[in-house]
Amino acid sequence: MTTDVIAAIATGLIPGGIGIVRISGPGAVKVAEKIVSISGIRLSQAKPRHLYYGFVTDGEKRLDEALIAVMRAPHSYTAEDTVELQCHGGPLVLKRVLAAALKAGARLAEPGEFSKRAFLNGRLDLSEAEAVMDLIRAENDFARETALSQLGGSLSAVIRGLRGQILEETAFIEAALDDPEHISLDGYPEMLRPRLLEMTKTVETLISGSENGRRLADGIRTAILGRPNVGKSSLLNALLGEERAIVTPIAGTTRDTIEETLRLGDVVLHLADTAGLRETGDTIEKLGVERAEQKARESELILYVLDGSEALNEVDRDALAGLKDRQCLVLINKSDLPQVLDPQEVERETGVETLRISAKTGEGLDELQKTVERRFLFGEIRQQPLVVTNVRHQALLQETLDALYRVRESLELGLPEDFFSVDLMDAYRSLGLILGEEAEEDLINEIFGKFCLGK
Amino acid sequence: MMKEDVLNQLTECDVAVVGAGHAGCEAALAAARLGMETVMFTVSVDSIAMMPCNPNIGGTSKGHLVRELDALGGEMGKNIDKAFIQSRMLNESKGSAVHSLRAQADKREYTQRMRETLENTPHLVIKQAEAAKILVEDGVCRGIETVSGWKYRAKAVILCTGTYLKACCVYGEVSDPTGPNGLKAATHLSDSLRNCGIELLRFKTGTPARIDGRTVDFSKMTEQKGDDVLVPFSFTNRAEDIEKPQVSCWLTYTTEETHEIIRRNIDRSPLFSGAIKGTGPRYCPSIEDKVVKFPDKERHQLFIEPEGLYTNELYISGMSSSLPEDVQHAMIHTVPGLEHAEIVRNAYAIMYDCLDPRQLRPTLELKAIKGLYSAGQSNGSSGYEEAAAQGIVAGINAALAIKGEEPMILDRSEAYIGVLIDDLTTKENTEPYRMMTSRAEYRLLLRQDNADLRLTPVGRRVGLIGDERWAAFTAKRDAIEREIERVKGVTLGTSEKVQSLLAEYASTPLKSGITMEELIRRPELDYEKLAPVDPERPELPADVREQVNIEIKYEGYIRRQKQQVEHFKKLESRLIPDDIDYSDVGSLRIEAAQKLERFRPHSLGQASRIAGVSPADVAMLNVWLEQKKRENKA
């Protein structure tokens, strides 16, 4: 009754002399054939239950030497066609071998799935049913725990953000499909194109990062925080030398985060301008504030901006108290206006290094650059790589990417919009599984939450 | 003693259907057509198949339901084909999976035609009487008792009580204990159901005001005409069979002033004051809901739709409300074109009892009471089409059960009807459930254009598709298969005729020969466009040509969804025995065991969709089921 091919590291991830990657299911040999090379024969010609010496490869790349055994149904543990790759035991090598098998068309085995199949296929006898169920439960609990511990805060934040974006796009399409008389999709594909590109890039970077340790964004993730209208956007603009963020004298203009990458002397900053911190009743702004706090958590450097012509208040004190253990700089902006704040006093009160600047005149920006460079060079600011280490996470990211590629293909073929959302939801579900969240009614809730539709 | 015997004989039947709305009509027709002696009860014979809210049938995803219903042998599609006064295919510019048919109905015509059909169906009797009690003995339903105490013994009872159970209509400070349109509410049955151990929910829905067409200035609105090319709902009709002059609908908008009036009077709405406790549908929010929830929206669309050719009354789609009468007047008069509109009937909200549908099997029979079925709004759905779709499923399954045949269960991969029933019976429902295309995960397969290909064989198996229709169907199906086969074998060369045709559609010229199939898949081309270079092409009806085009053009996508379906079916086909005791399945987490015990899913697939049941739980359950199976064999 099972039709798909599953794979997993059968010996666990404990370093040892030998580790086995097992591939099982009808077509297991075909999948394995893509990643092994045995001198002189193809894997499908291999004699069952004989050991062959060969290599596991990923495309051109040799991953490991291995002893390879093929077992034909029903003469294997699962009673299905099975290939076992006995590799050198390092966890990293085994993971790479497994990743190659997944790429070749296998699906990562669910906890306890080999044993489950063995039982369902009649390979294990009745008395072992309880043991199989216990195994499923134990392996499931273990997988959940390790998955959670390997999902860092910034990684889950990136995935959560991406997932939110995908849901937003899908909900728009679906709302329009369900209520074409209220919501039009005219011109939508052109709007989706660049946003899809960006989403795809994020996933690609996460995947390639997990392969060779590169970072998500080349640059120190930096957040600009502060109360509304202290000049956060002006600072971003001054650093960029262009009008990227909208600057108005109305408090609360930046309702969302704006991100830019820029070079500041010897270092590269990946800079996020955020909505001002304050208690707010406005829902859109509230979202912005939440994202600002989120950004701060993900950041490696925080620039906290104060208005030099105003005294510190509760919001500032609360925020700065929360940032004590972080890489943070306080910038007293608007040095061109009459000052009520003194850098040394602020530094004393908050315990955070404080500079005086004017985003308007450019005063103090040199000093800011030097300070950031110094901290970086002395290793105070450290970049945390966003590396996905969990095999299940990697497989799910790959599924996400495949789904996004299909959306891109549908876009390029000029297919109608309803084709996009089918694959967008696949991507959404895969990302959700990384976070341990199901899709359930998310889409319907998003549709009704964001769009006014219906008779 | 003798008197009682006579009574019993007079009132013996196979199937009793409680209610004569859209669910009741389909349930009664299906049962009677399958040879069951059927009695249909209604509080008012004049309100059979009444449309108390919007004057149309179909729309996005609902149109799919109607066509599926028709393929199974239902009546709604045929009836609207008789009674429509305007017809449109929505989403025509999008993919064929989301094309949706919608027709405006003449409400009186619709009711009358349905009544004619019912009255002329053998084995079917209509009774005007309120059912007050469900008769249950030892977990088996034995019939019903009317308010007057008359007992009807039945082998199956189908509840199609719509919004009538303890119904109450509300607007402003007014609260009327009636059903829709001032009809008598059913006041006794709720208590009887509770006494049988059935859990009820309290839902709320609403309808907008109707206005007098003579007092409307149409010059300030945008006209919306019907389509020139008609597509019938029923697969038994051809376009030329239903040809007729169509009437228009009209588009206008609310204004800032409308919103201002609503905001000023919001505290007088029973929704906001707390007088209404039920949960309303998010799909048809009241205008006050829209204004409060989307304060940034400057205006909301309103469609002015005729209620029929027999009347001046117009329906204001988009403006359902439960605000007081004076506020309704004031706000309607701020709408361009409606400045002097006379209200004929006020908008109102209606609250009613319905069953928690998770107590139902996918056959729509109650898990706890054999022979008792429930269909339609009484299951917490919304809409005529959702109701009718459940009606036919309940009617068919009641008849099949009496005959001792296999039930008819449609799953999520086979029909929107399957999605509808699976959602209702599996997920927690907190508002009247409306069908939506986004709920159907295999929607590229579940198109309205292939509903007959998917479901006519099912209708045939249960016995609702006659020989003539079956012959026409198989002829169509064979023609499609033959033509797809033929097209796959046609190779086109680089002749000038081909190249110039390609040039006409800005399609890349050919360097060498290519199959017709591949050309059809090019986005800028299709089956029809290639006719000039396909001399061998046989003459085929439009519906056959359409299927050939879609099946070839989207083959890759269709294939991928079919693979997903295969995977889905694996768990779906693992049925869970009725008598399972989940506390025996030792390894399950407590939360999962409790959820499973409470909702008692029909299959492993359904179990996997219950919130709180994880894939690991399902895997363990799977092993356990296999263990029991082997133990029983041994």
Image (tube, grey):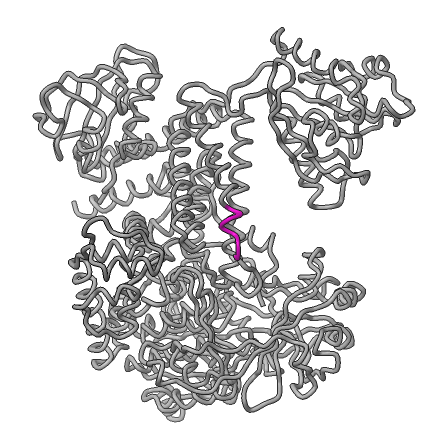
In the current view of this chain or complex, which residue is farthest to the front? B496
Residue A13 x %, y % = 35, 18
Relative to B533, residue A110 above or below: above
> From this viewpoint, which residue is outermost toward the top?
A378
**Left or right position of B464 against B292:** left
Residue B332, by quadrant, is bottom right
> Residue at coordinates 21% horizontally, 62% vertically from top-left?
B484
Residue A389 position by quadrant: top left
* Residue B199 appears in the rendering: no
- Residue visible at 22% across and 67% down? B480
Residue at x 70%, y 78% (from the top left corner): B337
- A356 magenta-colored: no
A235 versus B486 height, above or below: above
Q: In terms of depth relative to the viewer, which is nearer, B297 or B509?
A: B509
Q: Position of residue A221 (x, y in %)?
A: 60, 23
**Residue segment shown in magenta:** A186-192
**On-image quarter of the N terminus of chain A:** top left
| Left or right of residue B613: residue B522 | left
**Front residue of A169 and B552:** B552
| Residue A187 belongs to the span the image colors magenta | yes
Where does the image place residue B103, in percent across and percent down from the top left?
47, 77
Nearest to the observer: residue B147 or residue B480 = B480
